[in-house]
Image: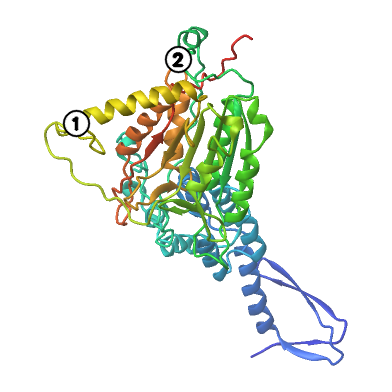
Amino acid sequence: MWKFLKLDRGNLITLHIERFTVFVFWYKSSPVNLPINWITNIYINTAHRMLGECGMKEREKQVLKKRSVALCKEMVVDELLVQFLQAENILTENMAESILGKETSQKRSWHLLSILPKRGPRAFSCFCTALRETEQDHLYELLTSCPEKERCFETRLPLPVQECPVPAKRARPNDSMEMCLDADCPVNTVLQPCTPEFYDSHCQQAYRMQSSPRGLALVLSNVTFDPSVSDFETRRGGEVDEEVLTKLFEELNFRVDIRKDLTAQSMRERIEQFSQRPEHRELDCCAVCLLSHGKEGGVYGTDGELLELDWVFEAFNNAHCPQLQNKPKMFFIQACRGEEMDNGVDQLDGSERTQSPGCEQRDAGRDEESERQNREREERERERLRVKLPQRSDMICGFATLKGWGTAAMRNTKKGSWYIQELNTAIRQSARDTHLSDIMVQVNGRIKEREGYAPGSAHHRCKEMSEFTSSLCKDLFLFPKYCPPN
């Protein structure tokens, strides 16, 4: 037998239902008879739902808290994961915008983890499902496995053998120009200072390196590309390279000018302006770093247009940039020279072959008499003419990948690119007593030993090989943190 409650306009009725106090206010002009059981069911369901939305279960909160460090280190919080949680009504639009607005991957992860415990009883299960949907299965297992079955995510393999000390995150197949491999935060190494004794014993055979600042450094970094005019994906982790290089050159006593997300034409204008800066005349060297997507012979602007590297080098040659004549000019190019991935080859047993065949030939054959006459003529000309310089000299340029192989460069969304990581570490450890050409050889060796770790993806055990070219005519010592007396 239903019991009815008659409500007139303006009536406020208080009902005590289970643990809840329910207020019923009738605002319409005509009276109504409402079944009490109907009111009770509505408000019980509503109240339980409201209580539930205040937070997830305590056990699930503890799991998130316990795993928060691993999640912050390893989780990819991108548009896909956030959109999934939005579709499940776990995140509001404002929450999604605040998460994606964070500068780094770790900050996005931490912000998401701080929101989830307050988003109701479905938040944990939907979050786990989102990890699976975004191919982060190892994190799904981390959250849902029983304690006795938990996997150990630490590795005892040394860094050169393995890119990630944890199972790699989902691969991003569309990021074709640079491959993304995720792991921990960048490792900072202290810049070792040069000693006065080393400077005194090596400064004579080296390029002059006494000015303060040592020189100007230009860093052009393209991370976000215009989707309306190019198909390039965002270079996640590129912002880490910016920070690493800026800090490195500032500690080397360079004045750093960093420019981000430029079109190809804007890059040309910025390089042209930089090469003509009058300060070069008083300073001892300069550095240019280009970080972007690329292909053989160039790097791309955010508009998908190509900036030719030959044009860049020409802007700093002895004709176009006389302020830097006879001074070292450093270039570092973090970009691909193609889209192919280097899957490596198996090394054969036994010692490596290090010698070239025992037959050498000249580029062009000339008989001895002709060669002697030319030498005499060159000597006479040398006496008559004033000293000249070649069009391009005193340059050293490091590339993340090999010329002619069309291979992709590897980038890590937390640490930055392999090449910039190793360049930064090698300079910080060795510049105190090693000239730059030998440091670049060390970088090549470090890159050669690195190997991608991404089980189940095309990136697993991928390789990379860097190289450098040099027209330096002396040893280039950076003499870090040493200011010689005037």
Residue at figure coordinates x 65%, y 43% from the top left: 273
Q: CA distance from mark 2 to mark 1?
A: 29 Å
Tell me if I can see residue 185 in this picture: no
Q: Where, quadrant-wise, is the N terminus in this rendering?
A: bottom right
Residue 428 at x, y = what percent? 48, 25
Residue closest to the eye, 451 or 69? 451
Image quarter of residue 367: top left
The three-letter code of the residue at mark 2 reads Gln
Badge 2 element: loop
Residue closest to the eye, 430 or 172? 430
User: Which residue bears the numbered disc 2?
Assistant: 205
Whether the residues at callouts 2 and 1 have beta carbons within 8 Å, the answer is no
Dot 1 alpha-carbon crowd within 10 angstroms: few under 14, some 14 to 19, many 20 or more: few
- For the rendered model, the colour scheme is rainbow
Residue at figure coordinates x 63%, y 40% from the top left: 274
Image quarter of residue 140: bottom left
Badge 1 element: loop
User: Which residue bears the numbered disc 1?
Assistant: 354
Residue 87 at x, y = what percent? 55, 71
The three-letter code of the residue at mark 1 reads Thr
Residue at figure coordinates x 64%, y 27% from the top left: 281
Residue 232 at x, y = what percent? 49, 61
Q: How many marks?
A: 2
Query: Quick check: 34 above or below 104?
Result: below
Q: Judge from the rendering whether residue 2 lies leftward or rightward of residue 377; answer left or right.
A: right
Closest to the camera, between mark 2 and mark 1, is 2
Residue at figure coordinates x 64%, y 9% from the top left: 486
Query: Quick check: 273 above or below 327?
Result: below
Tell me if I can see residue 36 in this picture: yes
Dot 2 alpha-carbon crowd within 10 angstroms: few under 14, some 14 to 19, many 20 or more: few
